[in-house]
């Protein structure tokens, strides 16, 4: 989890009631004055975000939040911001004052979280022993006891240091050769490749797989003269063109589908996309984009996919568009969710969104799978994952 890509750097969010010592704990943990500390309840009135270098992990984002029981005039607005911060968390730390245990909010939070009891220096040995017996999966700390802070740091590292799944994991290539077909159109950023293209090329370099990078106009000639191709990967928008040129000679998929396999739930996305034809008149569709950008007349999320969907089901449908970290609180009004490939989201965040959709029984797929379905090449584009 040591990515240097800002949006993929792991985020630790500290939550809990007011005055349980979240801010002081963060300051001691990082050895920095990140948050204002005061004995007055509700000192942290808005989220505080700080980049911190955690040894053996790399850069992390730490977010200190307002208390979940903030009863001030602006309390509900602050609590709403805290709830949004929770959705961004790779790791959620719920801090509780061990001298005044209140866990109602802790039990309401369905996300995975680590319970940390603070201020254990105020307990006697018997009280601390009983607390540990009652909550054996929790951590017990005091800003006045350095050994407990070290134990917390060690535990955070163990949770954050893990092997990320690669784009090509579980895929057996007949040849160590991948052809990257990268369209250069008005949506392509000037002078650079987009993140999933760069990630796959770097992964190929790291795993000794040969990369050949082409535009779609160069593909036919290359395929006519080369027969040792393990996989063709292209942008979803060029799927149909590339599929026609390839004519099922070599395995084919897209960057977006590789990301669905890497970060999401490929089987669920494929199962969901088949339900598109069941959408009824006036269906409400949520389109999610993980990065913010200006929309053009060729924008895939705001223009092309809505037009494809309308063409596919021939019904009157409504679209809502969300970008970045924003994700609707209430999904009940939606009949279907189409998400981007999520190159700017961590796997944890995407899986949280998938879990929410599944709990609401809302079908969810991503751009690449939808476009493959629309162009009638879905089976071809996921064959590589059969095993």
Image (cartoon, rainbow, N blue to C red):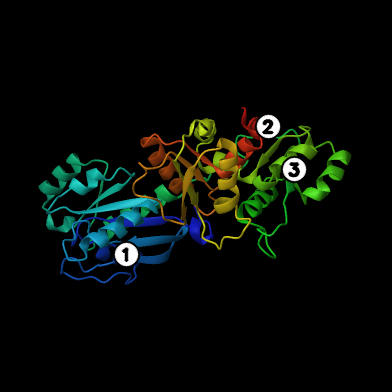
Q: Residue at x 17, y 40 (%)?
A: 134
Q: CA distance from mark 2 to mark 3?
A: 13 Å
Which percent across, then down, holds residue 127?
Answer: 11, 48
Determine which of the numbered discs, if any, sits on residue 241 in the image. Answer: 3
Determine which of the numbered discs, if any, sits on residue 47 in the image. Answer: 1
Pointers 1 and 3 in contact (CB under 8 A)? no
Q: Quadrant of residue 332?
A: top left
User: SS of the residue at dot 1?
Assistant: loop
Please say if 344 is above or below 209.
below
Residue 261 shown left or right of residue 225 in the figure: left
Determine which of the numbered discs, if any, sits on residue 380 in the image. Answer: 2
Q: Which is in the foreground here, disc 1 or disc 3?
A: 3
Mark closest to the chain's N terminus, 1 or 2: 1
Which percent across, then down, holds residue 124?
Answer: 10, 52
Q: CA distance from mark 1 to mark 3?
A: 47 Å
Pointers 1 and 2 in contact (CB under 8 A)? no
Q: Residue at x 23, y 43 (%)?
A: 107
Q: Which is in the foreground here, disc 1 or disc 2?
A: 2
Mark closest to the chain's N terminus, 2 or 3: 3
């Amino acid at each position: 989890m040591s990515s240097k890509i800002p949006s993929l750097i792991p985020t630790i969010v500290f939550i809990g009631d007011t005055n349980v010592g979240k801010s002081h704990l963060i300051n001691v943990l990082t050895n920095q004055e990140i948050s204002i500390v005061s004995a007055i309840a509700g000192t942290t009135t808005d989220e505080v975000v700080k980049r911190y270098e955690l040894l053996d992990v790399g850069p992390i984002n730490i977010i200190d939040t307002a208390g979940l029981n903030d009863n001030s005039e602006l309390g509900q607005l602050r609590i709403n911001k805290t709830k949004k911060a929770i959705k961004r968390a790779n790791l959620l730390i719920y801090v509780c004052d061990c001298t005044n245990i209140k866990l109602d909010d802790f039990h309401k939070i369905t996300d995975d979280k680590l319970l940390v009891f603070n201020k254990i220096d105020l307990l006697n040995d018997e009280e601390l022993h009983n607390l540990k017996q009652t909550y054996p999966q929790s951590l017990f700390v005091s800003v006045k006891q350095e050994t407990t802070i070290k134990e917390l740091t060690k535990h955070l590292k163990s949770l954050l240091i893990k092997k990320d799944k690669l784009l090509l994991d579980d895929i057996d290539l007949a040849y160590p050769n991948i052809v990257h077909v990268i369209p250069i159109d008005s949506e392509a950023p000037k002078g650079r490749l987009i993140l999933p293209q760069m990630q796959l090329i770097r992964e190929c370099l790291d795993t000794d797989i040969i990369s050949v990078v082409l535009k779609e106009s160069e593909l036919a000639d290359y395929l006519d003269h080369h027969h040792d191709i393990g996989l063709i990967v292209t942008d979803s928008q060029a799927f149909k063109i590339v599929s026609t040129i390839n004519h099922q000679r070599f395995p084919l998929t897209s960057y977006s589908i590789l990301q669905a396999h890497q970060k999401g739930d490929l089987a669920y996305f494929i199962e969901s996309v088949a339900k598109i034809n069941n959408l009824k008149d006036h269906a409400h569709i949520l389109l999610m984009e993980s990065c913010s950008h200006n929309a053009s007349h060729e924008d895939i999320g705001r223009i092309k996919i809505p037009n494809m969907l309308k063409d596919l089901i021939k019904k009157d449908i409504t679209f809502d568009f969300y970008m970045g970290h924003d994700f609707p609180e209430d999904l009940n009004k939606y009949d279907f969710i189409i998400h981007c490939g999520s190159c700017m989201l961590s796997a944890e965040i995407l899986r949280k969104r998938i879990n929410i959709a599944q709990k609401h029984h809302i079908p969810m797929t991503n751009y690449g799978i939808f476009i493959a379905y629309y162009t009638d090449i879905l089976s071809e584009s996921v064959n590589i994952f059969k095993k």
